[in-house]
Amino acid sequence: MAQLRIALVQADFTVGDIPGNVDLALERCREAAEQGAHLVALPEMALTGYPIEDLALRSSFVAASRRALGDLAGRLDAAGLGDLAVIVGYLGHHDDQREELGRPKGAPQNAAAVLHDGKVRSTYAKHHLPNYGVFDEARYFVSGDAMQVVRIRGVDVAFCICEDLWRDGPTMTARSADAGLLVVINGSPYERNKDDTRLELCASRAVEAGCALAYVNLVGGQDELVFDGDSIVVDAAGAVVARAPQFEEALLVVDLDLPAAAPDTTVAPAESSYEGLRIEGTVISREPVPAYEAKPGVVTPRITDEEEVWSALVTGLRGYVRKNGFRSVTLGLSGGIDSAVVAVIAADAIGADNVSCVSMPSRYSSDHSKDDAADLAERTGVAYRVVPIHDMVQAFLEPLKLTGLSEENLQARCRGVVLMGLSNEHGHLVLAPGNKSELSVGYSTLYGDSVGGYAPIKDVPKTLVWDLARWRNAIAVERGETPPIPDSSISKPPSAELRPGQVDTDSLPDYELLDDILDDYVEQDSSSAQLVAHGFDKDTVEKVLRMVDVAEYKRRQYPPGPKISVRNFGRDRRLPITSGWREVASD
Amino acid sequence: MAQLRIALVQADFTVGDIPGNVDLALERCREAAEQGAHLVALPEMALTGYPIEDLALRSSFVAASRRALGDLAGRLDAAGLGDLAVIVGYLGHHDDQREELGRPKGAPQNAAAVLHDGKVRSTYAKHHLPNYGVFDEARYFVSGDAMQVVRIRGVDVAFCICEDLWRDGPTMTARSADAGLLVVINGSPYERNKDDTRLELCASRAVEAGCALAYVNLVGGQDELVFDGDSIVVDAAGAVVARAPQFEEALLVVDLDLPAAAPDTTVAPAESSYEGLRIEGTVISREPVPAYEAKPGVVTPRITDEEEVWSALVTGLRGYVRKNGFRSVTLGLSGGIDSAVVAVIAADAIGADNVSCVSMPSRYSSDHSKDDAADLAERTGVAYRVVPIHDMVQAFLEPLKLTGLSEENLQARCRGVVLMGLSNEHGHLVLAPGNKSELSVGYSTLYGDSVGGYAPIKDVPKTLVWDLARWRNAIAVERGETPPIPDSSISKPPSAELRPGQVDTDSLPDYELLDDILDDYVEQDSSSAQLVAHGFDKDTVEKVLRMVDVAEYKRRQYPPGPKISVRNFGRDRRLPITSGWREVASD
């Protein structure tokens, strides 16, 4: 056996900011070296950030990524860290110069390299390219066909990238190469309960590969995606050795006892391969690490489901604000649950001092709404002002002679204009407070409550919004703090207050029922016939499905927000606006 | 040789409206039969419309498409058209029931079938799935691996689908099968000059296949895409035999003299194949058509480049309006060139009676703007009203104390609220008048001039907007009609008129220069270094590229509009909002 101290860099790399990412990578490698690591692994496409979308098609961007890889190797060496083996994800480039339809010459690859002694010693291109859900990698990348195994301090280390672990091939290839460790670098976005799946996967794939497995993931927010970290090390039996925290940057340093490669052998002999995936070997250093006292691995406990979702929302918002150069946010506070929860997420993400809330009462706003809005501001310490919209509404209402629903929408749009005006004047990012249930059925006003640069709870169903509110208040009580959300915002019947006595259930089923139907239809793609078979009332199903189908145009213009579900609106669920398809329950 | 009269159905099938599409298919087959056709070909995915996006992942939708195929076969037979061979595109289904990550069981296929005698006689699945530009077929479909050849009235007819023609394999397979005719069914969206490419492709592939080639395409608007028809028949030497009009429905009936298959042979013997693409043969009818007098094919002349673009914009808007159930549109008329052109496109698309224009002067609006807006309404006959926005603007300005750019945006947003109010009250679809140059550099107000359900000229650079205006006026003169666009709207310097004396060139380079840079950067993906090498001023390049890069968030919330360029914003060009990447010209 041979000892090896590995360090997994769970960090927040920024899409497109290649110089910043190189600096961050170097800094983390320095910390890892200070902690005595022999091998460092950084996440998938760490040097470019992930996902880079059509930036992959820009030859100047590909060139910058490849240059950055060499720069990082050089700077590591110059900093006296040449001895450290560093596995890092970057945007690579296939040598094949064939012109092919829809693909630039020298196609981009989702790649990983091993840096050592100032040089790029081994490169790998992702074999399995995911092209479903939020992933579009077949649009960008050419698949690699050779597994890489590098001998580091006498241990044969195989490595691959993200989706490679979820599919067959690479793990068995690592076994066939007799690898002592399999390192998997990832850009794996958060969704609810994915941490459980990920752990099971790591454990079973380690057993399959017949060696320990180290899984390192990105952390941080990138438009619709939130990376939750959750880096994991398991031993060859699949038992957890170490696990990093969720939604936080971390350097996970782990001592491993690994099978030593027989000295003087070549790495991964040419004949070893698995189902068409070749194996290429590189010797980086044969000399095993002198014996040292190993420290036990740290296994960070998992957080609860509510804390997980809350952390995802906070991480997503914080990332969007910071990476887009904002310092503050603004939103309308109605006294209702959605805007209350968004305000508290914002305060948790960037500090209450940077959150500016506006109450914009109309003549239909109830006293309790105004009170609850003010109460929330008082509890959280966010800035708060009141801008009555009556005169603004009247300025349109009279010349245009708007009535009914047009008048309701007008109120919401005047509020949108107020928020955008304050945003322009003060540089705030506007937050849209819509939840997933509303967004599903189109229960919102285009250019009204939907205005904003980011929509923190757009993937959170209404019933979960309430759960999160209760959870966040309970946590505050546990910590001896004031619960941030007024009880009456949680307990009162939801209302848009756009006409006298209006409540959401005038137009919608109860949210418990609505969310159940939406979960079946939007997340699971159930047909109306299946929904009826699941016990839902046929008329309700038809009504809800029709509302969902015709609201696509509203969703298309909605701001981005963090994905927490298995299928968010946007990257995950992509439907035509123009569509004659209607699910019919009698089908 | 054997005679065959084929009919290509160039028609407007609606995404999702399967029953409507079956009716339309049946009706066109009936017309084809009345004209004596022996073989009818309908476009790619005619029964479902194209592209269906994530509808492909709904099992209820796949089932409905497959049922519709059987229904169409049955209804053809019941209508006495069983004798007609009909090639039609539909959404099929692979029998493989393996569960695979990100793919529903029994994966969908982009398929074509031959119907005859009330039955589905042969089915084919698209071999080459495009996954670049506006196409995402790797997300949805499983590739087919067998070419189909059907013997119809003694002629061996091979068929394939769209992208199959653009890549290697299927054409050579048709040659290897000794086909007498290759039928290609398409859903090929318009872009400028694509008709020339398409004709060259058909000619060269016919020569390669060694047989005549019939190319049938969709027509009509579907969200961002416009299908231009342009169905083509070429002979085995690649010479054009017939060509359908652009942007119009048509039934292209063509008499062909084709090689007769040797009687009593099997179709496409098992040993014939090409590069892994198997060939399967089906005999539908051996008996050649009795000799008849052939008519010469009709070759419709091509329209000019300007007319092509104009027709695309009109077709796109008309399709969006009709298929989404609108009867009328509204837009703000500023007196400038963009809204003038949009108003005329709308009048051409759905009739001036259904176009309702609103002039919304502020205190910065010039007299000539108000005059030009009224003049356009007079010339075109669109409905016209004036809604001054001064009081609305003041209602926000005073309590919010907005200044400078915030005040400019406020005016645009008040206009947005007016238009949306009129839309809600009267059911009009709101049109956004932004052009591609503005959209590229973010020269627009979010929720202001950007409001709308459809943006007819969002893919048209400003310089082309002027060209189109001049062309449209010239056409009117040719027809003896009043030129619809006031000369001064064309000739005056463009201005947003949001502050005194403002002109676009205060913030932007001259549009001639801007559009040249944008063409290089947005359409060709040139780097800043390449742009400088192309002779553009370094500072101007940096300024423009930076404006383009930071405006992504605005584009993301912009309404859809018809693609006319090689790279439109939306389906074609997909960039992250959050991105640290900045092209630097000194690079």
Image (spheres, coloured by chain):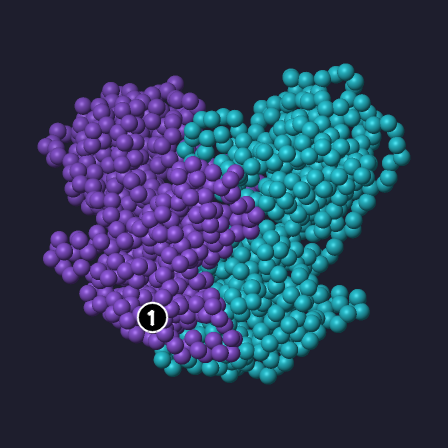
Chain colours: A cyan, B purple
Residue B186 falls in image quadrant: top left
Q: Is residue A580 left or right of residue A110?
A: left
Residue A465 higher or lower than B298, as above or below: below
Give the number of callouts.
1
Q: Is residue A283 left or right of residue B353?
A: right
Q: Position of residue A319 (x, y in %)?
A: 62, 54
Q: Is residue B545 left or right of residue B503?
A: right
Judge whether residue B535 can be spotted in this image.
yes
The N terminus of chain B sits in image quarter = top left
Q: Position of residue B126 (x, y in %)?
A: 40, 35
Q: Residue at x 80, y 46 (%)?
A: A299
Q: Toward the viewer: B294 or B197?
A: B197
Q: Residues within 10 Å of mark 1 (few under 14, many from 20)?
A: some
Residue B558 higher or lower than A75, as above or below: below
Judge whether residue B136 can be spotted in this image.
no
Mark 1 secondary-structure assignment? loop
What residue sits right under mark 1 in the picture?
B365
Q: Residue at x 76, y 32 (%)?
A: A80
Q: Residue at x 31, y 59 (%)?
A: B493
Pointer 1 chain: B
Residue A221 higher or lower than A102, as above or below: below
Q: Position of residue A75 (x, y in %)?
A: 69, 34
Q: Toward the viewer: B489 or A309?
A: B489
Residue A145 falls in image quadrant: top right
